[in-house]
Image (cartoon, grey):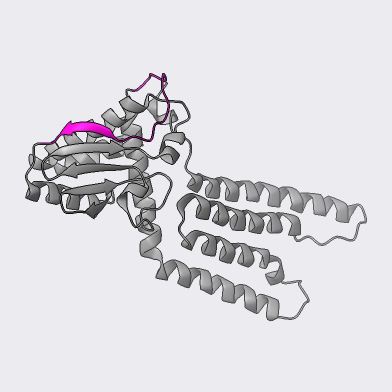
Amino acid sequence: MSYRSKIRMSIGWIYPIGIFSSYIFLFLEFELRRILRQGGYDVWGVPYITILLVAFMFIVLGIIQWFRYRNWIYPVLGFLIGITTAQVSFVFPHYDEPGVFKLTYFICFILIILFILINWNSFYSHERFEINSRRLFRLASERIYQTDDGYTGRPYSGGRVDCTRDELLGFVRFLHGNYIVRPFYYEGYVCISFSMNTSLLVIREGREVSHVIIGYDGNLTVKVSEKDYRDYSERLSFDQLCASLADIFTRFFDYYRKGLESRIIIELKSAK
């Protein structure tokens, strides 16, 4: 089995799939209403049912993303897009109700644009962090085929990294600057966090999600969260997964120390 099929699809793919499907349903409802009108039934040509279903989809997806990522921007955006979509039928030229409905539609549309612009950094950062976290987990599972044990809550000792304090801090800054991990600095170590689920922008402690702890003495510890582990479609060997993640960060640090930072980006992008 290819390692690319081991991780479940990101929830973000539901949006393009849902939008594409909505065009199909719009066409079908248009045709159904046209046939009914030809049969003498008094129905309008506006596909109200599909419009309302799409609006409901955006609101539900926003709520789902809240429970998954714990980031408030997604339910707010889902609600704004859902309410705006529900008002689409009011902007059709033949709609005879007062223009207040058209006005509220355009107000909501402008609010969506403003909301996205104001929170663009949060949207962009979250998406980059999640994409790279998925790439890390794909790389980690690339050569794992054993499924003999499941999740355990204990941290995994990943050996040692031969580094100085300045080298470690520079390495962590590089990973953070490229949206690969979010670092949390402590007196004797750095906790670098990554997650396919919870948004790294809302956590207050690195241990809330999957993370790697690298001490200034070089000791390395790996902890994979249960939510991230359950995102694999098959029950991988947990110890091998942790060991693989330890090897990845050790290898990435070796690239960084040799001035081969570009190899880190290339290796991550290879895990599409």
Q: Relative to residue 58, is residue 137 drawn left or right?
A: left
Camera-side residue of 50 and 244: 244
Q: Relative to residue 65, is residue 170 drawn left or right?
A: left
Q: Position of residue 186 (x, y in %)?
A: 20, 53
Quarter of the figure with the C terminus: top left
Camera-side residue of 8 and 26: 8
In the image, is residue 184 above or below residue 271? Answer: below
Say whether residue 259 is visible: no
Q: Relative to residue 53, is residue 115 drawn left or right?
A: left
* Residue at (37, 40) in percent of width and height: 134
* Residue at (38, 19) in percent of width and height: 146
* Residue at (38, 47) in percent of width and height: 130
* Residue at (77, 50) in percent of width and height: 31
State the image quarter where residue 258 is shown: top left
Magenta span of residues: 144-161
Q: Position of residue 48 (x, y in %)?
A: 75, 59
Say whether residue 19 is visible: yes
Q: Position of residue 208 (x, y in %)?
A: 36, 49
Is 12 in the magenta?
Answer: no
Q: Position of residue 238 (x, y in %)?
A: 36, 27
Q: Main secondary structure of the magenta part?
A: loop
Q: Residue furthest right?
A: 40
In the image, is residue 36 above or below residue 98? Answer: above
Quarter of the figure with the N terminus: top left
